[in-house]
Image: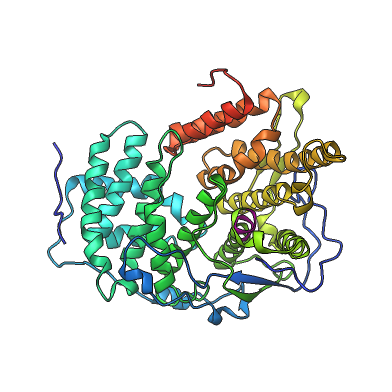
Amino acid sequence: MRENGDPSPMVAAPAQSVSSLPDLGVIGIPTTPSTVIPSATVSTPLAEGTASPGGADLATSTPFDVQTLQGIQLYLDHSDIKAASPTTHGSIPAFTVSTEEETLLQHYVRRLAKWVRFSDADRHFTITVPHLARRSPILLKAVSALAARHLCCLGSWDSAIAEDYHKQCIGLLIPALGDPNAATDDTLLAALVMLRLYEHLNVSDSGQDYEHHLRGVSAMVTSTIRNPWTASGSGLKWAAFWCFFRQSIYPACVYRQPLKFDISGSNIEVRLSSPAAGVMPTVEEESEWCHWITWILGQVADFCFGTRSLELTPTEEKESWNGLVQAVDMWEANKPKSFLPVACNDREPEQGRWFPEIWFGSEWHAMAAAQSLAARILLDVHHPQTRKITIGEFGFLRARQQLERKVLLHARSLCGICLTDPTNVSAIFTMCHAIFTFSSFINIDEERRLLVRVLRTVERDEGWPTTWIVNALKVDWDVDWVDE
């Protein structure tokens, strides 16, 4: 018997190219420290506005202020983030958490918080969100809906329970968004991030994702987060920004559609410099490096699937593509040594090792490497000149072979990272970003089976829906073998 709780209230091309960037090695990422570029500057666009939300009141929100982001340094003092206390809209003094809701909160902390904390050094979605959920009915219902949906995916709960919590959350959320103070409420933003993840888990076997709450989060980010790098407000707001941004990249890559996030509004400078020799970066500094490659991946997705590139001249398109390639190269060349793999085994098919084995010191190092590889795969396939060569045209076969070599180099490394540590959900999520871009190049049956196996494993063990991806891959590959 359920015990119900109270349902109430681009990177633009730099002026000069970086010369003699290090070769990224046979597995697509460097295995030894790269040549350091002491200080490199990339001009990058950041969001000024986002797509209009489903709700009416947020459509007139103040635009995302990006002018304050000029001259950002990657090495930041996060004391202002930690000191600020998040606001708690909807908190009520006599608020009781039911036994079932507490069970779902604990499940969220143990199994789901890692899905959204990724590169958050202060683990706000692991520590702060459960604390706030016990004081905010809206956030509690959002977390409960997400946890219940995940348990449904694992086959241990009835889907009606998740739907009930989701309905209760929406019933509380709609009037709350009309509150004049909603734009300053961190719990509402966190709740929208939870609801967006709920939609990811609720995707159908066909892969249909309606992205209702991605629009809502877009509006909240536009109206509340003035400066994501200096985090005007609480650290939870900062963490929620990056959760939202990653959530917008995934459907853009998987469904080949424009980002629900406008990154073309303004040019800013991000100064990238390597740590001094022998000095290990702090966790906050490592977090910044993770954020930067995430931002680059978002820019790459915007270039590949957005509409802005369609308005560029051939020369402008090539310059934009070169600028993005250079941004990835610069990140690889300047990243701290802690981001390098701790061990690698090359691909050796004759020994049954179809993908390279690549180990990292931490999950977010692996995720960052996976994002870098995903960006390279997308850029390889969407090279302006290659895309203009049609089937049957002279030079097509040569161009196809060159493209296949580059894509397979990076794709096998990406798959190898995921196979080496199948518990690293963040890396596997990143692989799913690029899987439909590189899957057609995977033509060896053993590699196909291994790729499907890791997708099946993440759905069985972690509850992330991948059946629709496997079904699509089998159609693309024209295979009928049973993989379960």
In front of the other: 141 or 324: 324
Q: Is residue 28 above or below residue 334?
A: above
| Residue range highlighted in magenta | 299-304
Q: Quadrant of the N terminus?
A: top left
Q: Decide which of 319, 114 is in the foreground and name it.
A: 319
Residue 134 visible in this rendered orientation of the protein: no
For residue 293, above or below residue 401: below
Residue 40 in view here: yes
* Percent coordinates x, y for residue 11 in the rendering: 67, 66
Q: Residue at x 21, y 67 (%)?
A: 91
Q: Is residue 356 left or right of residue 392?
A: left
Where residue 68 appears, x then y in whole percent?
54, 82
Question: What residue do we see at 55% from left, 81% from top?
Answer: 67
Q: Main secondary structure of the magenta part?
A: helix
Between 111 and 378, which is closer to the camera in this rendering?
Answer: 378
- On the image, the x and y values in percent for residue 311 come to 66, 63
Q: Quadrant of residue 158?
A: top left
Total marks placed: 0
**In which quadrant of the rendered view does residue 460 lie?**
top left
